[in-house]
Amino acid sequence: MINDQYKFSELTGRIIGCAMEVHKILGNGFQEFIYQKALAKEFDLKKISYSREHEMQIFYKGEE
């Protein structure tokens, strides 16, 4: 479903569809790394560009 009110509605729907496909095929119980690889494969199949594992500053309770 596309909602013209939201700029990335179509892309969001496609991403959620990929995540649901991975879950449908793999189910529960694997390590996060397995799901990351499967989702990357799904993005490739659906021609959704992405990048993984970005370095970024994270602060928790005022500390980096």
Image (tube, rainbow, N blue to C red):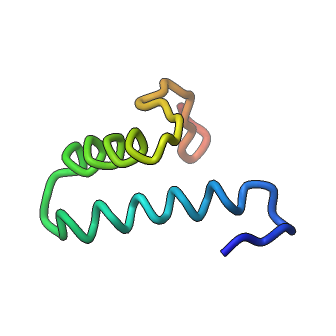
Q: Quadrant of residue 59?
A: top right
Q: Residue furthest left?
A: 29
The picture places residue 63, in percent across and down from the top left corner, at: 55, 35
Position in image of residue 30 (x %, y %): 14, 57
Name of the residue lying farthest toward the top: 55
Q: Is residue 5 shown above or below 32?
A: below
**Residue 51 placement (x, y as % from top left):** 48, 30
Q: Which residue shows up at 67% across the image and 60% down it?
A: 10
Q: Residue furthest bottom?
A: 1
- From the viewer's perspective, tell me whether residue 11 is left or right of residue 33: right
Q: Nearer the viewer, residue 42 or 56?
A: 42
Residue at 30% in and 44% down: 36
Q: Quadrant of the N terminus?
A: bottom right
Res 11 quadrant in image: bottom right
Q: Is residue 63 left or right of residue 31?
A: right
For the image, the number of numbered tags is 0
Image coordinates of residue 56 in percent, x first then y, are 54, 27
Front-lying residue, 7 or 55:
7
The reply, left or right, for residue 2 in relation to residue 45 is right
